[in-house]
Image (cartoon, helix red, strand yellow):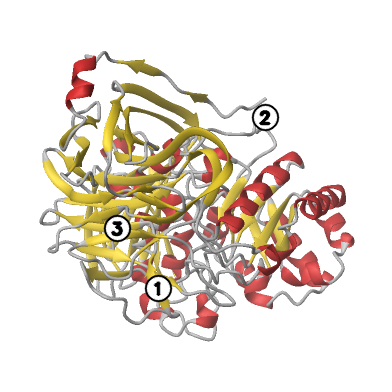
C-alpha cells in the first residue's frame, strides 16, 4: 500500500510570561523568523489599535507596514485591538510526498507563533504566523465555539510593495458566461498601474501575483493556501493605493453555474471555530526559487486519502482540440488507439461524450485496450451532493477512471465547497479529478492527491479563441511556471502543432517543450492522431517515455518573460529543457558537470523549418554546454546511459 507521508512536529521554546504582558500596548510585537534566519514576519499595533505587519528577507524589507484586520457582521477587528496573549515560538515540520509536483519528497521546517487579540467588545481574533526558508505566511482564526454563522464583510489585508518594483500580474475577469476562470495574460506592470487590455472586463488582479523588489534583488509571490469550503477564493484590488494591494472577495454575480444554490452575497460565512486560508508570501533571491517552492502545499492540509496506491500520473490522448469533440464513437476509439500506440495511460472523452448518452461502448473499447478513460462533466450538475455522488458512482461502475468537470467560473464559497466535495466523493469512488473553467488551485493536490490537474490557464485552446495569443504565447510560457504552476498542477494541453485559426509563432520544439516545463498529473496532449503519427521516431519515443511528473527539479536559468531552463529527473531519467520567451535569438551557457556519468545526450532543437521541423542530434556530454535559442524556440536534452 502506497501512503502519502505526513508528519508534523511542534517543539515549544519557553518565553517568559512577563514578555507577553509587556507587548499588550501599541508598538512592535514579537514576530517569528525562519530557522535559517533569513525570513521574518513581525506585527505591530498603532495608537488606535490598528494592526499591521512587515516582512524582511536577509534583513531587507520586502513588504512594509501593511494592514491586517477583519470587519464582520457582528464584530469589528479593524481597530481598538489589544493583545491578550503571544504564544511561544513553535517548530512545525511538514514532511510528505507529492504524487504531482516538481519534487516528489518534501521536508520543510517552519517556526510558528500565534498572537491573540481582543477588540473593544471583548471578542477575540487570533493571527497565526509562519516563517520558513521559502517565505512567510499568516492567517486569521476564531477559536471560540458558536452555532450562528459569522460573516466577514471585509478583509483589510494588504501587501505594500515598493513603488519602484515591477510585477507580473493577471487581470481578474468580471463575472460572465465563461469568467472568472483565470484565463488571461500575465502583464509586466509597474506598481500602481491600472488594468489595461485584459481579455475581458476585469475587477482586480489574480493571485498568485509575482513581484520583483529591492532593485530586482528579491522576488515575491503572493498567493493563498488551503482555501476550503469555509471561505471564498480571493483576488487583489485593481489599483494599489500607495503600493498596497488589498484582498478582495469573490463577486456576488459569479453565479453562472450555481444560480439555484445562491442564497447570500459572496461574503464568506461560517460557524465558529473558523480557521481561514493562509496568506502566503514566497520569497526568493532568484525567480527559480519561486518556481520550485512547495510552500503552498506545505501549508495546505495533509492528505485526506490514506491509500493512494490507485492514483497514478500519466499522459492522455484528447480529441477535442483537433476534432472539436464531434461526439462520434469512431473518433473516441481513434484516440484510444493513439494512446495505446504511444503507450499513454489515459484518454479523455470530452463534452459531447456526456451529451451522447454516455456511450459505454467507447469506455469498454478503451478499457479493453488497457487505456483508462476520463470523461467530461458540467459543473452545474455537481452542486447537489446526492446527485454528484450518484453520478460518480455510476461512472465508476461504467469503467471510468476520472472526471473532467468544467465551467465553474466562480470563486464564491459555494463553488469552492463543491469542488472540495467533488474531490472527496471522487476519492471514495477511486476517481481522478480534473477541473476546468475554474479558479486557481491552492495547494489542493496535497490534501486530495486524486486531484491531478486543473485549467485556470490560458492554454493552447487559445489558438482558436484569442488573436493575441500567438504573439504572447512564448512570453507567457516563461511567466506561468513562476506564477500559476506554483499554485498547483496546470492543464496547459501541450504539443499543439497543427496551425489553427490564429497561427502559431512558437517553434515546434517550443510547443513540445511545454509538456516538460508545465507540471500536470495527467498531461492532455493537443492535436490529431495524424499529427502525432507524422512525428519523427525520436519525438515519438520522447512522448512515449517522458514522465508526467517528477522526482526532482532544478532551476538552471530563470527570468520571467524571457527564459526558463529546468533540469528534470524521474527515477533514472534525466532531462534539461529550455524555452525562449522572446522573439530574438538568445545565447545560453550551462554547466553539465553533474551529468558526467552519462555516455552521451540527445539534443532536440529546431529543424530546417523551425515552425514545423525538429532536429535530433546525439552529442557527447561536456562539462560546459553552449546553445543559441531560436526566436520563440526551445531545446530538450535527454541524457543517455
Label 3 Cα crowd, 10 Å radius (few <14 / some 14-19 / many 20+): many
Q: Earlier in the sequence, mark 1 or mark 2?
A: 1
Q: Which mark is residue 210?
A: 3
Q: Where in the figure is residue 496, as x and y percent of width and height?
A: 53, 71
Disc 3, SS:
strand
Determine the residue positioned at 71% across, 58% down: 383
Q: Nearer the viewer, residue 606 or 11?
A: 11
Residue 636 point in image, percent of width and height? 40, 56
Count of marks, rendered view = 3
- Cα separation, mark 1 vs mark 3, equals 18 Å
- The quadrant the N terminus occupies is top right
- Relative to 500, is 568 above or below? above
Quadrant position of the C terminus in the picture: top left
Question: Which residue is tagged 1?
Answer: 203
**Quick one: SS at disc 1?**
strand
Residue 28 coordinates in the image, percent (x, y):
15, 36
Confirm whether residue 116 shows in the render: yes
Of the numbered discs 1 and 3, the one sitting upstream in the chain is 1
Is 503 above or below relative to 356?
below
Tell me where residue 304 sits by quadrant. Answer: top right
* Residue neighbourhood size for the residue with mark 1, other residues' Cα within 10 Å, grouped as few (<14), some (14–19), many (≥20): some
User: In the drawing, what numbered circle is on residue 616?
Assistant: none
Of the two numbered discs 1 and 3 in the rendering, the one whose residue sits closer to the viewer? 1
Amino acid at each position: 500500500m502506497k501512503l502519502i507521508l505526513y508528519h508534523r512536529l511542534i517543539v515549544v521554546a519557553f518565553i517568559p510570561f512577563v514578555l507577553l504582558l509587556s507587548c499588550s500596548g501599541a508598538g512592535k510585537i514579537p514576530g517569528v523568523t525562519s530557522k535559517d534566519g533569513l525570513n521574518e514576519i513581525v506585527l505591530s499595533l498603532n495608537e488606535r489599535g490598528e494592526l499591521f505587519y512587515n516582512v524582511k528577507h536577509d534583513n531587507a524589507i520586502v513588504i512594509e507596514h501593511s494592514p491586517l484586520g477583519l470587519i464582520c457582521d457582528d464584530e469589528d477587528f479593524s481597530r481598538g485591538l489589544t493583545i491578550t496573549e503571544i504564544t511561544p515560538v513553535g517548530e512545525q515540520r511538514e514532511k510528505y510526498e507529492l504524487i504531482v509536483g516538481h519534487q516528489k519528497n518534501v521536508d520543510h521546517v517552519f517556526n510558528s507563533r500565534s498572537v491573540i487579540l481582543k477588540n473593544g467588545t471583548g471578542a477575540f481574533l487570533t493571527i497565526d504566523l509562519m516563517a520558513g526558508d521559502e517565505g512567510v505566511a499568516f492567517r486569521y482564526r476564531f477559536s471560540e465555539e458558536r452555532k450562528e454563522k459569522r460573516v466577514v464583510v471585509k478583509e483589510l489585508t494588504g501587501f505594500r510593495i515598493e513603488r519602484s518594483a515591477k510585477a507580473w500580474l493577471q487581470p481578474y475577469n468580471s463575472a460572465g458566461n465563461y469568467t472568472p476562470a483565470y484565463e488571461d495574460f500575465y502583464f509586466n506592470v509597474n506598481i500602481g498601474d491600472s488594468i489595461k487590455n485584459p481579455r475581458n472586463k476585469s475587477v482586480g488582479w489574480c493571485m498568485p501575483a509575482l513581484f520583483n523588489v529591492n532593485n530586482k534583488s528579491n522576488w515575491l509571490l503572493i498567493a493563498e493556501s488551503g482555501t476550503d469550503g469555509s471561505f471564498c477564493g480571493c483576488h487583489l484590488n485593481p489599483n494599489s493605493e500607495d503600493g498596497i494591494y488589498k484582498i478582495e472577495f469573490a463577486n456576488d454575480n459569479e453565479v453562472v453555474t450555481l444560480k439555484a444554490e445562491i442564497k447570500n452575497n459572496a461574503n464568506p460565512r461560517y460557524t465558529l471555530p473558523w480557521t481561514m486560508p493562509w496568506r502566503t508570501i514566497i520569497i526568493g533571491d532568484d525567480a527559480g526559487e519561486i518556481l520550485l517552492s512547495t510552500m503552498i502545499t506545505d501549508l495546505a492540509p495533509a492528505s485526506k486519502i490514506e491509500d493512494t496506491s490507485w492514483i497514478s500520473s500519466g499522459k492522455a490522448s484528447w480529441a477535442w482540440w483537433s476534432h472539436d469533440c464531434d461526439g462520434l464513437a469512431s473518433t473516441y476509439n481513434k484516440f484510444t488507439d493513439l494512446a495505446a500506440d504511444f503507450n499513454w495511460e489515459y484518454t479523455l472523452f470530452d463534452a459531447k461524450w456526456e451529451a451522447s448518452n454516455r456511450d459505454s461502448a467507447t469506455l469498454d473499447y478503451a478499457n479493453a485496450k488497457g487505456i483508462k478513460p476520463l470523461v467530461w462533466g458540467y459543473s452545474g450538475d455537481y452542486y447537489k451532493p446526492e446527485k454528484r455522488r450518484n453520478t460518480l458512482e455510476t461512472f465508476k461502475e461504467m469503467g471510468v477512471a476520472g472526471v473532467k468537470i468544467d465551467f465553474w467560473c466562480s470563486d464564491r464559497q459555494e463553488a469552492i465547497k463543491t469542488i472540495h466535495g467533488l474531490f472527496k466523493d471522487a476519492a471514495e469512488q477511486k476517481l481522478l479529478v480534473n477541473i476546468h473553467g475554474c479558479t486557481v488551485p491552492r495547494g489542493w493536490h496535497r490534501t486530495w492527491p486524486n486531484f491531478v490537474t486543473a485549467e485556470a490557464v490560458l492554454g493552447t485552446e487559445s489558438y482558436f479563441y484569442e488573436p493575441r495569443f500567438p504573439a504572447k504565447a512564448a512570453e507567457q510560457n516563461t511567466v506561468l511556471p513562476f506564477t500559476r504552476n506554483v499554485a498547483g498542477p496546470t492543464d496547459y494541453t501541450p504539443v499543439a502543432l497543427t496551425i489553427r485559426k490564429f497561427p502559431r509563432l512558437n517553434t515546434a520544439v517550443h510547443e513540445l517543450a511545454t509538456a516538460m516545463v508545465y507540471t500536470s498529473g495527467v498531461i492532455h496532449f493537443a492535436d490529431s492522431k495524424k499529427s502525432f503519427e507524422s512525428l519523427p521516431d525520436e519525438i515519438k519515443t520522447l512522448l512515449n517515455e517522458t514522465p508526467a511528473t517528477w522526482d526532482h527539479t532544478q532551476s538552471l536559468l530563470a527570468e520571467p518573460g524571457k527564459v526558463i531552463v529546468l533540469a528534470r529527473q524521474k527515477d533514472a531519467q534525466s532531462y534539461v529543457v529550455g524555452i525562449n520567451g522572446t522573439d530574438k535569438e538568445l545565447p545560453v551557457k550551462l554547466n553539465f558537470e553533474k551529468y558526467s556519468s552519462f555516455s552521451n545526450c540527445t539534443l532536440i532543437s529546431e529543424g530546417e523549418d523551425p515552425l514545423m521541423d525538429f532536429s535530433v542530434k546525439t552529442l557527447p556530454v561536456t562539462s560546459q554546454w553552449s546553445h543559441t535559442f531560436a526566436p520563440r524556440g526551445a531545446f530538450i536534452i535527454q541524457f543517455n546511459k
